Image (cartoon, grey):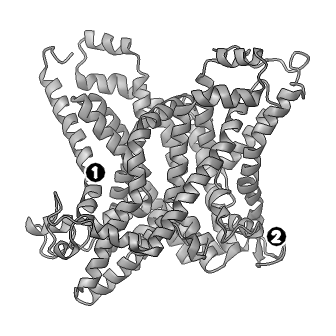
Amino acid sequence: MENRRPRAKKRGLTDRPPRFDREQISLQVMVLPAFLSVVVFSVIPISGVIISFMDYKLGGGLFNGQWVGLKHFADMFSDKLFLRALRNTVVISFLDMVFCFPAPIILALLFNEAPFKRFKRLAQTGSYLPHFLSYVVVAAFWKIILDNKGIVNNFLLSAGIVNAPVEFWTTPKYYWPLTVIVSLWKNAGWGAIIYFAAITNVSAEVYEAAIVDGAGRFRRVFSILLPAIMGTIVVMGIMRLAGLFNASFDQSYLLGNVFNRDVSYVISYYTIELGLRRMNFSYSTAINLFQSTASLILLIAANTYAKRKSDASIF
Amino acid sequence: MGKLRLTGEDVAMNAISALAVMAVFVVTLYPVWYCLIYALNDNVDSIKGDLYILPRVFTLENFKTIFRNVNVICSYGVSAARTLLGTLYSLALMMPAAYALTKRGKLRFYKFYTAVFIVSMYFSGGIIPFYLLLMNMRLLNTFWVYILPGAVGYFNLLLIMAFLRELPSALEDSAMIDGANVFQILIMVVTPLSKPVIATIAMFVAVGHWNDWFSTAYYTTDPNLMTISTYLTKLVQEEQAKASMQSLAQNTVTKQMLAADMLKYACLIATIAPIVMVYPFVQKFLVQGMMVGSIKA
């Protein structure tokens, strides 16, 4: 299948650039629309971060406003609302990392061991479904289920565990655990797919050799499957860690309400609220820039660390 | 295998994993089912509550009511239009690009293109510069704000590329010898062979369009551009506002409020119906596409 040569090691005379013949032009024409789309809608906006060093005013060009240097960045750390958003973001992402990151791994290993092939496949297919549902729908489902008159409260009441319905959505202390539950429901099934792929790649020979050597079921899971998917786990872990400052806006907006706002609003919520509702463009962009820079640093750090400790990395 | 002696360990493992599978099945699908039975139950009867397994008084009245609502029909139409157009546009951009990018040795500026795509994946200017761009391009409050901005995603591009690399090159070569140019090869040879990955990406993109409520809420104000997800968001948020006022006002519940509540169930089901109906047909490709992609990418 591989009929092109591996990339020439030496640059120089042997590495002639492809000519601009008709084929080359055709190939360029194929890439350009997609490339331009990305340049216009993703790369050009990056230059917009300069407004975080200004007091930008609407109207006129990009440079419409006074340069204020790092003022907005300094403001951030005395802004109680921002600090709280930062805390909420980190807590929610951290909980996500502790509970929602291992879940797909456990799920994949359990599904792999389970009997009843057909039913298993059905359940597996079903478990991917929530990934394709809008967060709006997911939030609505869980609001209904955990409503005062919802099924969970009915159960708790009739089992005599509580005397009055639990106000899940309006009690701040329940909010963080609830984000974990909703994220698990939405993402765990689909998240497992990548581990299924990794498990499928485990060579049957190794597996059979282990059986012959008398390794039991648990032993096989921990000594063969788990090490085999470790590379995937590390890569996913890196991505997850890099997302420490990115808690979902959808979640915050759709599960949050006036009662739990103090614990539910995250950085993305705060920047959108500041920027698009209160038109505080520069400050909002400054927070975003801080967030994406911090994420990038985390990503690179995690990646470097993983590269040193094991071979797995994402770049 | 199953006929072999089962050790105690095997039995334990089977039991644990089978239970887990059962639990996953019930937990993932029950919320959907729960809404469905409420949506299909007569809403005066639903006030009594205690509906868990099947509707007690079956009716399609709730669905008839929501589809008599002009707002619902209109937003359903906008969602359908944007999903269809958006997906086509997105595929039309990504398929050729992915194909050309697999010609690593031939394509000039390959590294430059890849670098730009990678940057776009890991770094963004944030919401405000993006919003200002949309404003300057006069895209705000137009239908095109749904279609143009998110058309190309590098992740999707990588999935397509991973799939295309696996295709046997013999067919392409013979077409080339027959004098076909790269466009003809892409359309007549590569595309028909790429149905699984096209189905996968189409599903991802289409679902993204159908589910997006954010662009409508923040980039448009024209009621004619309302999409079904956003309409549902409004419905749910209003519901909640009412509910919290209600709980403040000592649980006084009017019949009207509850009727509106039941409509919410029907609206929810109507929103997810297209996805749930397409899903069984695409899921096989999805898994295939993701497997190839996740191993290669």
* Side of B66 where B47 appears, left or right: left
What amino acid type should be assigned to the residue bearing mark 1?
A: Leu
Where is mark 2, residue-wise?
Answer: A62
The residue shown at (22%, 35%) is B17
A45 over A172 or under it: above or below: above
- Residue B92, image x and y in percent? 67, 43
Where is mark 1, residue-wise?
Answer: B29
Front-most of A212 and A38? A38
Classify residue B126 by image quadrant.
bottom right
Quadrant of the drawing holding the C terminus of chain B: top right
The residue shown at (14%, 67%) is B50
* Side of B116 where A100 appears, left or right: left
Q: Give a yes or no on whether discs 1 and 2 share a subunit.
A: no
- Residue A308, image x and y in percent? 57, 32
What amino acid type should be assigned to the residue bearing mark 2?
A: Leu
Total tally of numbered discs in the picture: 2
- Residue B260, image x and y in percent? 32, 78
**Mark 2, other Cα within 10 Å: few <14 / some 14–19 / many ≥20:** some
